Amino acid sequence: MHTVYLILGSNLGDSGQQLADAVRLIQDRVGDIVDKSALYETAAWGVNNQPNYLNQVLKVHTALVPEQTLNETLQIEKELGRKRNVKWEARMIDIDILFYDAVILDTPRLKIPHPLLHLRRFVLAPLIEIAPDLIHPLYQMGIADLFEKLDDNLLVKRMEK
């Protein structure tokens, strides 16, 4: 079994329901969800004039290889109404692979660890909740240490679990 960390996000429609539906489908198709963060209300990163997001990080045990994991998460996004038109646009659902074991992968289609995770408060805040001691394989730093070095000060508010 492999350990994969995923971040879910939604800022269109019923975001709470979108995340719940994604969690159910991930459990069915990707692997056993062994931990999950609370939901976080977060400001849109990289763009202005969008509704706030709901985000959540999942820790999943999977038998899938990274490409299969990506294929399944993309299919789940599509089934839940994700349209891909413009980078960082508002979306019904977004599922990104943050880490897959300690794998470092850089292909045109998939980059692991996620190349921007260390810059984003909306990623690190829920990740630190469930994996504060996880080591970033490129930076050789724990998630808690990366969080302390953040310059990002966008809104990230933990919702009740």
Image (spheres, helix red, strand yellow):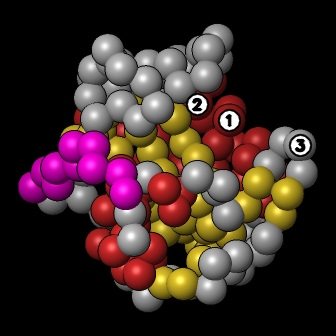
Report helix, strand or loop for mark 3.
loop
Residue 42 location (% of width, % of height):
27, 40
The residue indicated by pointer 1 is 74
Whichever of labels 3 and 2 marks the residue nearer the N terminus, that label is: 2
The residue indicated by pointer 2 is 77
Q: Residue at x 68, y 33 (%)?
A: 75
Q: Marks 3 and 2: CB-CB under 8 Å?
A: no
Q: Residue at x 43, y 52 (%)?
A: 120
Residue 84 location (% of width, % of height):
64, 17
Number of other residues with Cα within 10 Å of mark 3, as a class: few under 14, some 14 to 19, many 20 or more: few
The residue indicated by pointer 3 is 108
Q: Residue at x 36, y 20 (%)?
A: 48
- Frontmost residue, 1 versus 109: 109
Number of other residues with Cα within 10 Å of mark 2, as a class: few under 14, some 14 to 19, many 20 or more: many
**Could you tell me the amino acid type at mark 3?**
Pro
Tell me the CA gap for discs 3 and 2. 20 Å
Residue 57 location (% of width, % of height):
41, 58
Q: Magenta includes 87?
A: no
Report the side of 113 relative to 111 (left or right).
Answer: left
- Frontmost residue, 65 versus 97: 97
**Could you tell me the amino acid type at mark 1?**
Leu
Report helix, strand or loop for mark 2.
helix
Q: Magenta includes 158?
A: yes
